[in-house]
Amino acid sequence: MSNIYGDWLKQQREAADLTQQRLADMAIMTRSHIAHIEAGRRVPSKEDARRLDRALNTGNVLSSFLPEEEAAVADYFEAARLLESQAVAIRESAVTFVPGLLQTRPYARAVLGTTYPPLTGEECDRRLVTRLERAKALDDPVTPVFWALLDEALLHRVVGDRQVMAGQLAHMAELAEAGRIRVHVMPRDRGAYPVMQSMLSLMWFEDQPPVAYSEGIHVAKIHDSPAVVERLQGAYYHALSDALSLRETLALLKSTAKDYEHDA
């Protein structure tokens, strides 16, 4: 997103002879949240913008001219990726594809092969490297704490080929058995459920408010309004309550992986 908004906020803060921490205290926010807004990595919620206006005595400028948050995934994902790298806890739900942090190299390459218009070989390789670099976040034994809620349909959608699927499901089962992640499958016989409309990622941080990231076809959005984030968290946990347990999910992942191996 353009950083005109963040630059203007910084100018007003400095003109008022305020540090980021002092402004954060006055606006009831965190210093890192202010820093992210000034750097163009975050868009403040309407409530935050109003508090900033009051703290800086800028009328309603900051709340009236918030940057537009709807954008193509390509434009928005860099900000989402940065947030993901800073998160201490992540909860994801996925209906179509395995979440990026859990994808194996063959699976990720097959997913990138579905892009339209088709990517050049060089661009596909570049995106593949980026996706695999993201997955290295799970090399840390503790942070981020990662949970995934997966629609059962994605286990049976053959992405790449059956050998690719066997490796992908086995990879998730290994991570779950090692205690590095929790994964829960939503059975197909449960019918409709909250958060099945799109991919959803909930993120928590050490020193800033939680955010949510949702993604659809050619559109994505970062949500940082406390009320919206709370509603999305509620929808996620409501759906999670109907999913299979970790033990049941592990059994399903292993049996489905074996089926793929046998067929392959």
Image (tube, rainbow, N blue to C red):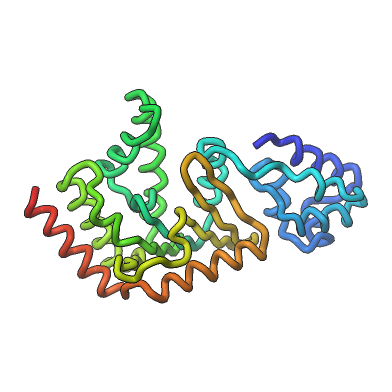
Answer with left or right where residue 62 lies relative to residue 261. right
Q: Position of residue 63 (x, y in %)?
A: 81, 50
Q: Nearer the viewer, residue 227 or 122?
A: 227
Image quarter in which the N terminus is found: top right
Q: Nearer the viewer, residue 42 or 234?
A: 234
Q: Position of residue 22 (x, y in %)?
A: 82, 57
> Which quadrant of the figure has residue 120?
top left
Q: State the count of labels.
A: 0
Please name the residue shown 71% across and 52% down the image.
44
Please name the residue shown 54% across and 38% down the image.
72
Please name the residue shown 43% across and 60% down the image.
196
Please name the residue shown 66% across and 47% down the image.
42
> Which quadrant of the figure has residue 41?
top right
In the current view of this chain or complex, which residue is farthest to the left?
Answer: 262
Answer with left or right where residue 203 lies relative to residue 139. right
Answer with left or right where residue 120 lies relative to residue 227. left
Q: Nearer the viewer, residue 251 or 7?
A: 251
Q: Position of residue 220 (x, y in %)?
A: 54, 45
Q: Position of residue 217 (x, y in %)?
A: 46, 42
